[in-house]
Image (cartoon, rainbow, N blue to C red):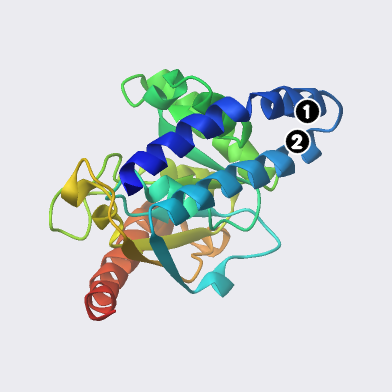
Amino acid sequence: MRTFLAFLYLVLYLILTIPLMIAEWIIGKFNPDLKDRSSLAIVQWGFRCILWICGTKITTIGKENIPKDQAVLYVANHRSIFDIVLCYSQVPGLTGFLAKKELKKVPLLNFWIANVHTLFLDRQNIKEGMKTILTAIDLCKNGISIFVFPEGTRNKTEDPLLPFHDGSFKIATKAGCPILPVTINHSREIFENQFPWVKKTHVIIEYGKPIPTAELSNEEKRSVSKMAADVIAETYVKNEQLVINA
């Protein structure tokens, strides 16, 4: 029943928000900042409703670690298609995602995710991929955070992490913004572990201490992906026990 209701809600949300899409397009012509913030609110509301329908409880740890006065590069582990829904429902300010280019082809959904500064990354095209990274750097410099999953794909193994791709970390080192490690536990239990059904689940999201890239030496910047990966892997193992005992 949860699976059916979640799918039905998504379809109705995309159809019934078409008038809002038009309104947001008009608002963006005259007041881009208002459009950014209203689109964020609309998308977050939609994601929170889906999580409620799916019976997903979220325990958040370390939200006080998110800087309030500057953009950050969020980097997280990735085990479920629900990770974007979980994380984006939590972000406190304007935030874009680096997402696979395939999402750009999903009708109606592509409008909303593009409207909140989602950048579509083509990993097979180095030139286009570099343009996307440069756009993300500009967004961070202009106060808009970016959320990335550096593994590049969902981790279907029992290991805490797949190897991180270093390229996305250039967003932080070139923009001079902090890197915020984000660890997600138990998200695969929402859907993937009992595909094609949705299951009531308790997810833990922990925000680590920011890594201040502007204060790092050039040598430290070259290994910053390992710094973030080590924090996330350690936190994942720790919080997996919290989930088991919850």
Residue placed under numbered mark 2 in the picture: 35
Sequence-wise first label, 2 or 1: 1
61 horizontally vs 22: left or right: left
x then y, percent, for residue 74: 48, 54
- Would residue 150 be seen by someone viewing this image from the given angle? no
Q: Residues within 10 Å of mark 1 (few under 14, many from 20)?
A: some
Look at the picture and state if 123 lies above or below 79: above
Residue drawn at x 63%, y 37% is 138
Label 2 to label 1: alpha-carbon separation: 5 Å
Q: Is residue 77 left or right of residue 66?
A: left
Residue in the image at 46% along x and 47% along y: 50
Check the picture and name the quadrant holding the C terminus: bottom left
Q: Position of residue 217 (x, y in %)?
A: 47, 60
> Where does the image place residue 110, in percent across and percent down from the top left?
51, 25
Residue 28 disc label:
1
| Label 2 CA crowd tier, 10 Å (few <14, some 14–19, many 20+) | many
Q: Nearer the viewer, residue 85 or 147?
A: 85
Quadrant of residue 212 within the rendered picture: bottom right
Amino acid at the residue labelled 1: Gly
Q: Are marks 2 and 1 in contact (CB under 8 Å)?
A: yes
Q: Could you tell me residue 101's position as x and y percent?
A: 40, 24
Q: Residue at x 29, y 47 (%)?
A: 80
Q: Secondary structure at mark 2?
A: helix
In the rendered image, the vertical position of residue 17 relative to residue 198, given as above or below? above
Seen at 57% across and 59% down, the residue is 214
**Amino acid type of the residue tagged 2 in the rendering:** Lys
User: Taking 18 as reference, is 146 above or below it?
Assistant: below
